[in-house]
Image: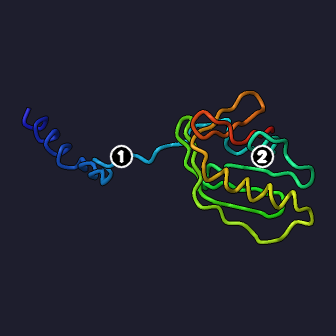
Amino acid sequence: MRHSVLAVLLLVACTAAPEPDSRIGESAPPLESSSPVTNVEWRLVRLSGEPAVEGTPVTLRLVSAEKRAQGNGGCNQYSGPYALAGSSLTFGEIISTKRACVQEALNQQETAFFGVLSRVNRYTVSGSTLRLYRNEHELARFSR
């Protein structure tokens, strides 16, 4: 019996205590769930109720790993942060290259597009269509 008690005491003494978890009390970083809107190239179809101007397509891609929106505004490449939670979507400050388009209509559309991104507060995806809204008002429509 004495050997059994010694063996148990020796086993308890030799078992290392678990390292304290320094993350206890911290919230884990939120994982972006697989979203039908991210990591897809979307092409502008309508902007503020008007058909997209023919020419270089306006594109939008929400890169989930970087939380950055990027694409082509029709004349210039652009990029900026975005925040996505449920059906809520907002864009931070958009930066772009500064090339002028040959077509004035593309210049105007690009300026309007960047302005629309600053007003977006939600989105919907239905099939291959992405719609960006300010409350209930559709601001832009894209297709895959």
Q: Which residue is at the front of the view, 87 or 66?
A: 87
Along the line of sight, which residue is nearer the eye, 29 or 42?
A: 42
Q: Residue reaching furthest left?
A: 2
Residue located 80% across and 38% down the image: 143
- The answer for how far apart the CA atoms under marks 1 and 2 are is 32 Å
Q: Is residue 15 above or below residue 126?
A: below
Task: Say which quadrant the C terminus sits in.
Answer: top right
Residue 94, placed above or below residue 85: below
Q: Residue at x 24, y 47 (%)?
A: 15
Residue under pointer 2? 41
Task: Return the x and y of residue 29 as percentages of the image width and height.
Answer: 44, 48
Q: Position of residue 38 (x, y in %)?
A: 67, 43
Q: Residue at the location (74% across, 43% down)? A: 48
Image quarter of the N terminus: top left
Q: Nearer the viewer, mark 1 or mark 2?
A: 2
Q: Position of residue 112 (x, y in %)?
A: 73, 54
Please tell me whether residue 113 is drawn above or below residue 131 in the rendered image. below
Q: Nearer the viewer, residue 20 or 108?
A: 108
Amino acid on which disc 2 is placed: Glu
In the rendered structure, the answer to whether residue 57 lies left or right of residue 131 reads: right
Q: Which mark is residue 102?
A: none
Q: Position of residue 96 (x, y in %)?
A: 72, 66
Q: Secondary structure at mark 1?
A: loop
Q: Residues within 10 Å of mark 2 (few under 14, many from 20)?
A: some
55 lies left or right of 120: right
Q: Is residue 58 left or right of residue 125?
A: right
Q: Residues within 10 Å of mark 1 (few under 14, many from 20)?
A: few
Q: Mark 1–mark 2 contact, CB under 8 Å?
A: no
Q: Quick one: label 1 or label 2, which is nearer the N terminus?
A: 1
Q: Residue at x 70, y 36 (%)?
A: 131
Residue 27 shows which numbered tag? 1
